[in-house]
Image: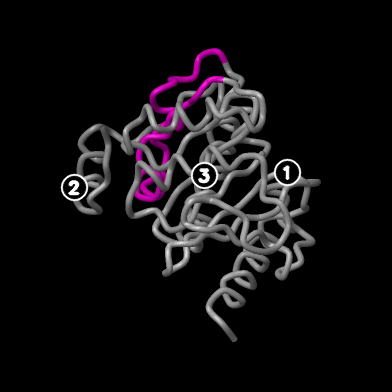
Amino acid sequence: MSAITKAREQITVMAKSLYDRGLTHGSTGNISMRLDDGTYLVTPTGSSMGFLDPARISHLSETWALLSGDVPTKEIPLHTAFYETRGATGAVVHLHSCHSVALSLLPEIDQDSVLPPLTAYGIMLLGKVKLLPFFVPGDTAMGSAIRGLAGKRSAVILANHGPCVAAKNLEAAVYAMEELEATAKLALLLRGTSPSLLAPEQISQIVTRFDVDWT
């Protein structure tokens, strides 16, 4: 099996897992992966994450020109900005997951750090999650907003739209996305209560031990 075939299969398996567990629905969400030769695989526009055909996953050149497969997602500007500003990025996952979107709509949310410090893994896998304003899907301004972060955030939530996570490889990006959605769900379940958040000194210990960018 060639490297590109194996990578397409991996995207298909991961995408179906996300879909089957309700983290994305219909034809929403998209995934990209950077291959060792500098080219990219991207899920096609209008495709369902639960029913991808590996052979039709878009294969793009280093300059994002279509080499094979179907036309890629219209959210390409979102993906390219992460690869350009975070050099270690090997994969990007963007979903319309319910709890993350719901959290983005609450007026009291801290736009610089959407997720409250509820668990160690939320901090370890995501760092601070930035809330970005609403953009029409596919708007190139989304990419500009990501570039404006200068590579400091690996995860964002687009208001009224959904989260996007960049990581060193596809597995890490999927796991981080799952943690983001789980933490958002916890935050909503605890809304109106007075939960015991991690204390600043506990956060500092996590950040130091696991080398988390907490700026």
Q: Within 10 angstroms of label 2, few (less than 14), some, or many (20 or more) residues? A: few
Q: CA distance from mark 1 to mark 3?
A: 15 Å
Q: Within 10 angstroms of label 3, few (less than 14), some, or many (20 or more) residues? A: many
According to the image, label 1 marks what residue? Answer: 28
Task: From the viewer's side, name the closer residue of 32 and 152.
Answer: 32
Task: From the viewer's side, name the closer residue of 32 and 140.
Answer: 140
**Disc 2 and disc 3 in contact, CB within 8 angstroms:** no
According to the image, label 3 marks what residue? Answer: 79
According to the image, label 2 marks what residue? Answer: 208
For this view, does 20 lie left or right of residue 61? right
SS class, disc 1 = loop
Question: Mark 2 is on which residue type?
Answer: Thr
Q: Nearer the viewer, mark 2 or mark 3?
A: 3
**In percent of the image, x 59 and y 35: which residue is there?**
100
Question: Mark 3 is on which residue type?
Answer: His
**Disc 1 and disc 2 in contact, CB within 8 angstroms:** no
Task: From the viewer's side, name the closer residue of 54 and 26.
Answer: 54
For this view, does 23 lie left or right of residue 195? right
First in residue order: circle 1 vs circle 2: 1
For this view, does 179 lie left or right of residue 137? left
Q: Within 10 angstroms of label 1, few (less than 14), some, or many (20 or more) residues? A: some
**Residue span colored magenta:** 107-133
Question: Mark 1 is on which residue type?
Answer: Thr
Q: Is residue 108 visible?
A: yes
Please say whether residue 157 is one of the residues in the magenta stretch.
no
SS class, disc 2 = helix
